[in-house]
Amino acid sequence: MFQNRAEALALALPAALFAAAVFIVPVVILLSDGFRAPGGGWTISAYTDFFSSSLNQAVFLRTLKLGALVTIVAAVIGYAAAFAIVSLEPGAKGKVTGLIVLPLMISPVARTYAWIVILGRTGIVNQAFQALGISEAPLRILFSETAIFIGLLQLFLPLMIISLISALENMPKDAIPAARVLGANWFQVFWKVILPLTKEGVVIGGTLVFTGCLTAYITPAILGGSKVLMLETLLYQQVSVSNNFVAASVIALILIVMSFAANILLKRVATARNKTTRNTKGTA
Amino acid sequence: MMARNLFIPITLGLVIAFLIGPFLIIVAASFSAGETLAFPPQGFSLRWIAKVFTVESFRDSFFMSLFLAIGGTLAALILGIPASYALSRYKLPGAETIRTIVSAPIIVPGIIVGLSLLRYIVVPFQVGITLALFLAHTALILPYAVRVVSASLGNLRSDIEEAAVLLGSSRLGAFFRVVLPNIRGGIMSAFILGFVTSFNQVPVSLFLSGPGVRTLPVDMIAYMEIVFDPSVAALSALLAFMSIGIVFIAERFLGFSRYV
Amino acid sequence: MSDQNFLTLENLTLAYGDTVAVKDLNLTIGKGELVAFLGPSGCGKTTTMRAIAGLLSPASGHVKLDGVDITRVSANKRNVGLMFQSYALFPHLSVYENVAFGLRLKKTPAAELDKRVRAGITSVGLTDYADRKPAELSGGQQQRVALARSMVMEPKVLLLDEPLSNLDARLRLDMRSELQRVQKETGVTMIFVTHDQGEALSLADRIVVMKRGAIEQIGSPEDIYNRPTSAFVADFVGFENIFELSDGRLKTPKGLVEISGPVPIAAGLAWRPRMVTLGSGPFQGAVRGASFAGNSREYLLDTPLGPIKAEVDAALPSHELGAELAFDLPVAAAAQLRKFG
């Protein structure tokens, strides 16, 4: 460790000042706009206005719902996939992990665009449904919450799987067979051993997925269309269609607060589980 | 036990199909001979792949995106390498604050970054769109650059600089002679991660577009809203192969995944 | 079912994918026995143990325990205890909760659970550590938690994977007496796996020596130590001079060599270094290496029979490197091998 403070600041400050000037200051001003009263002074009326609109409420709740749903489903699929991957032979494990990571390198535009081909009126799903006689007329899957859900899940599932793979690999060797031999069925093995020992991984993965869902623009824009909005697409619409920068500022702060809140909440959940396990020994 | 033996291939088959399948469909659709985007493709032709290269806006926005990805990443590294070095090698008061400031752009939705830049830098200071995009992409890549270079510095023993200084090198000389050569892999990895992130980035660039100035993904979205032919599929496939190729080469020669 | 065949393995074949680890294994273990599976790594001993625990299902064959065929019973319903080599304690749970883990799953009433868990922890001498997390314990203490965790379940069979190999010499003695105490007090049937002949000899009632997925020899520690029946076992328990017999002569790198005395009908003969008579005898060898080991001295001789290792009392005068010595391989002392190679 070097001690020279001036030297250290000279090295670190350009980056910090750049980030502050280009990013932090403008964002903070943008966020403060939402609290500015028209005649000067401060107010939260923009926020009460925003939430009094039933359309905005619906968008807010949809964002929350889709974010939570995608996170939960990604965790469930993620555990199954990560568990399967870590039980592969080393060579196969590397290849499969590569296939899981691969989509992260592909442009989200391309990844989202594919779903139009699959979910559209004449898409593969509708072709299959009609051929199998499940539906007569083409179903409207595109431009719906379902389409956004599928798109977001595909976009962010790899992040969850990767977090869980490293969490599972860091689990003590033989913890699972030890639980089996002590009488745990597979459900109990998951609940009492795997989950508590991988909770950090699922919290990291969950935060990445949930934050990703909040900040994703392309997926709701392409798969939700102009009617099924999420907060990001609503923000874009407020600016580009209505020129309503105050509303944009309000949405921006809501998005930031939501991702921080999710982060804190998930960490809480993780430590809360820890506490209950510690308490049981006291009561026993 | 039989059930468990089937569990692994079935789970992985479904997950990989879900993750990779759509991309394969895009690739297949881009070879279609038909007028509209569809799967299974109608006939086989290379016309849409050829068309990608003739659309002028694609060409312009491709070079714009390429410039931003390379220029932005280089700028982020020029700012980020000294900062990472200071954060990992010096006892610096407020180190955590600096780290938070530098990594902040990663946690705030990109659309907000783009909008605030437009409102409070571009408009008041009359900054050109290209410069604004360059600043935005640099800010966006900076957190990745600092993270990857820091990780790579963390794996390097700090006493080698002291050894170099004791052998008569200046501090700056020690950095260039012994530190830099040893974190080259980390820097290359940061460059590739930054490049891919910037190239695929949409929300930040969304508001930062002017007449004739657009990044490629934004241009693709705009094109899709007007024309629904397989050329966007063809372009997507081409870009995807480009990204995969870069990452594959990086992994092959640098062990890219160690740093990310 | 009688106590003699409390646990039986019948024609057991175990495989990982296409790799056969254990082939057509038959073994009967009596109630209350303390059996060691001894062999080098890859001999199938741990695989067999995992199959008994139900962690690996056999490709073919049967496992029967206490008169019941448990081949298709899953691991969590067998009531077989397993102490892992890594101990496999749950790091997120206290010592108390680790020990209580299995009893909680069985929905044991709170009062009884507490009583049994505390008794289990006390019996391994960790009363004061009940609230600690595994990471706060030493390796030896962790292992005793693992032992208590298995024992509170009152398993029909307790399996131990290399129970002494991670411990230093002093703790090894402690754990050895601990296991003997547990076995004496509870009468539980114990099977432990080890690659260390010393461990097997000192602890087991009966030793099963395994080689490449099959049983090589079964016997008491004395049998295995003194009367190995194959070249493999002889080599494993320290017979350094091992020869194949052909028409009553020793097969050596330089051809067949006559040996004095009535040669038994066997596939081979083996001598421990200290069975070699040094200083007299029909053979000659040059000293190529010598080492001092406290009570004894070991010599490596270059001989027409190939290299021979001999061990003699350290009180006897020592020999220089290069010295020519006479020696004998007394047939009467040799272990007779029924199987060679």
Image: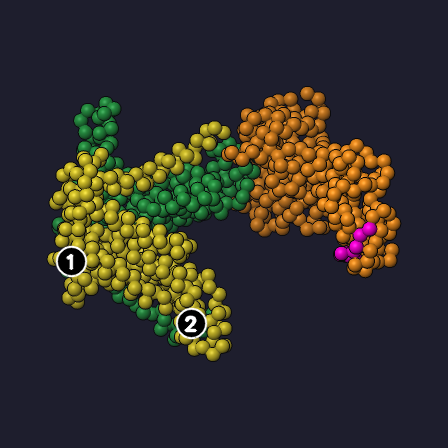
Chain colours: A green, B yellow, C orange
Q: Which residues are magenta?
A: C284-293
Nearest the camera: B230 or B31? B31
Can the viewer see residue A11? Answer: yes
- Up-down: is C12 above or below B89? above
Q: Secondary structure at mark 1?
A: loop
- Up-down: is C28 above or below A280? above
Give percent across and percent down for residue B63: 20, 58
Give percent across and percent down for residue C130: 61, 45
Determine whether, in the image, residue C142 is placed left or right of residue C3.
Answer: left
| Numbered mark located on residue B213 in the image | 1
| Disc nearer the start of the sequence (2/1) | 2
On whether residue B215 falls in the magenta region, the answer is no
Quadrant in which the C terminus of chain B is drawn: bottom left
| Mark 2, residue position | B177
Label 2 crowd (10 A; few <14 / some 14-19 / many >=20): some
Give percent across and percent down for residue B61: 18, 55
On whether residue C285 falls in the magenta region, the answer is yes
**Which one is closest to the eye, mark 2 or mark 1?**
2
CA gap, disc 2 to disc 1?
Answer: 41 Å
